[in-house]
Image: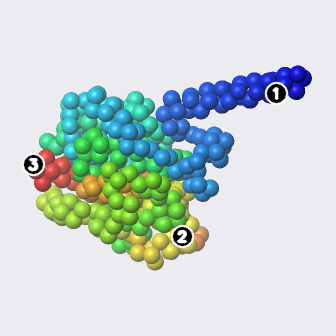
């Protein structure tokens, strides 16, 4: 009898605990994919593989987010734009704009960096129908690579087939100067090579293959178009290889020398993961880096890079980058 009662009490306690846990887990689920998982969640989530956090977004997550965007705007753009540090002002030129805060889109994280607004701006720019990300997500903010790249997949499900990615970058190529614009010809996915790749986890075949080829990521005809537009409008366009690091720190002098020796021309903390996911999903990609500072390669050299320097130089480059982007969009708006 006593044993039975104890068993009952234990059963009741266990079931209460289960309800409490289920309640909190349920809250987390309702509140979309948690952007800031607790240590408990990190260690217990089946997606946590011991090194990296991997969100297992499914096609229905991406579709739900895309559908919510679709429901909020009459526009059906095919060109996506990711506006990097200091460049988000360009979204202000989008005509007939629908503005959607990221917080209104299911599963979207929130941008936490100064200089990065957090909203989608959908409308017409230089006659081309665009969906611009005014502010992006970075790995260094604490998001998983799946969260960082979620908007790209959402854009693809929304109908975007061509993605223009911009960023601020440190110049590694000794011939580069602050204020240069670099056409990204290729990239080095250092973070991905180190095991933090947005394509980790179950492959979503609806987007692309399990083992995608990445030897032609930055679309050749778009590179040619940007080159032609730059020439047409008197803009000096540099070209080179971009390498993405995790950040948030800038590089040591030894790291700068190493990156240069590896063949990188510009270094930054974004773009590669987004581009990879776009390419996996069959999108055309154009990448442009603004050289906002020259990476310092000598020990004890004067000066140091800072976010403020990056933002200030970004402003210096905005007019030329805007001219270039508008020219590219004008051609795309006319059908390429
Ligand atoms: N290093 C890394 N990321 C950057 C830099 C840099 O020098 N400049 C702008 N983003």
Residue 86 in sight? no
Disc 3 target residue: 334
Residue displayed at 48% across by 54% down: 201
Q: Quadrant where the N terminus lies? A: top right
Residue positioned most to the bottom: 261
Q: Nearer the viewer, mark 3 or mark 2?
A: 3
Gap between marks 3 and 2 measured at Cα: 44 Å
Q: Nearer the viewer, mark 1 or mark 2?
A: 1
User: Considering only order in the chain, which callout, 2 or 1, is on the residue closer to the N terminus?
Assistant: 1
Residue at mark 2: 255
**Residue 104: in sight, yes or no?**
yes
**Residue drawn at 50 percent across, 74 percent down:** 257
Mark 2: secondary structure: helix
Q: Nearer the viewer, mark 1 or mark 3?
A: 1
What is the CA distance from the residue labelled 1 to the residue labelled 2? 62 Å
Which one is in front, 15 or 68?
Answer: 15
Counting every numbered tag in the picture gives 3
Q: Is residue 58 left or right of residue 12?
A: left
> Circle 1 sits on which residue?
7
Rendering coords of residue 54 (x, y %): 52, 50
Is residue 131 found left or right of 309 in the rendered image? Answer: left
Query: From the viewer's perspective, is residue 250 above or below residue 150?
Result: below
> Where is residue 58 shown, x and y percent of the image?
42, 44
Residue 89 position by quadrant: top left
């Amino acid at each position: 009898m006593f044993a039975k009662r104890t068993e009952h009490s234990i059963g009741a306690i266990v079931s209460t605990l289960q309800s409490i846990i289920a309640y909190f887990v349920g809250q987390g689920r309702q509140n979309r994919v948690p952007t800031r998982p607790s240590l408990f969640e990190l260690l217990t989530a089946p997606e946590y593989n011991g090194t990296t956090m991997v969100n297992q977004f499914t096609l229905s997550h991406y579709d739900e987010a895309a559908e919510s965007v679709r429901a909020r705007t009459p526009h059906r753009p095919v060109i996506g734009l990711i506006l990097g540090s200091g460049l988000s002002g360009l979204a202000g030129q989008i005509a007939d704009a629908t503005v959607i805060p990221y917080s209104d889109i299911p599963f979207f994280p929130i941008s936490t960096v100064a200089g990065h607004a957090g909203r989608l701006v959908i409308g017409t720019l230089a006659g081309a129908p665009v969906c611009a990300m005014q502010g992006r997500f970075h790995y260094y903010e604490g998001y998983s690579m799946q969260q960082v790249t979620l908007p790209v997949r959402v854009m693809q499900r929304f109908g975007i087939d061509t993605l223009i990615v911009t960023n601020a970058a440190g110049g590694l190529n000794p011939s580069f100067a602050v204020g240069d614009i670099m056409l990204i010809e290729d990239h080095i996915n250092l973070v991905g090579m180190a095991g933090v790749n947005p394509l980790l986890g179950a492959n979503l075949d609806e987007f692309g293959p399990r083992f995608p080829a990445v030897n032609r990521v930055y679309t050749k005809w778009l590179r040619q178009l940007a080159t032609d537009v730059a020439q047409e409008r008197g803009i000096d366009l540099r070209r080179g290889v971009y390498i993405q690091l995790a950040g948030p720190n800038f590089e040591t002098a030894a790291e700068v020398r190493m990156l240069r020796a590896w063949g990188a021309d510009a270094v930054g903390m974004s773009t590669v993961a987004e581009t990879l996911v776009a390419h996996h999903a069959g999108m055309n990609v154009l990448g442009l880096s603004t050289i906002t500072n020259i990476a310092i390669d000598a020990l004890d050299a004067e000066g140091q890079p800072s976010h403020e320097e990056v933002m200030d130089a970004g402003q210096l480059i905005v007019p030329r980058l805007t001219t270039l982007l508008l020219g590219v969009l004008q051609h795309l708006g006319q059908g390429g």
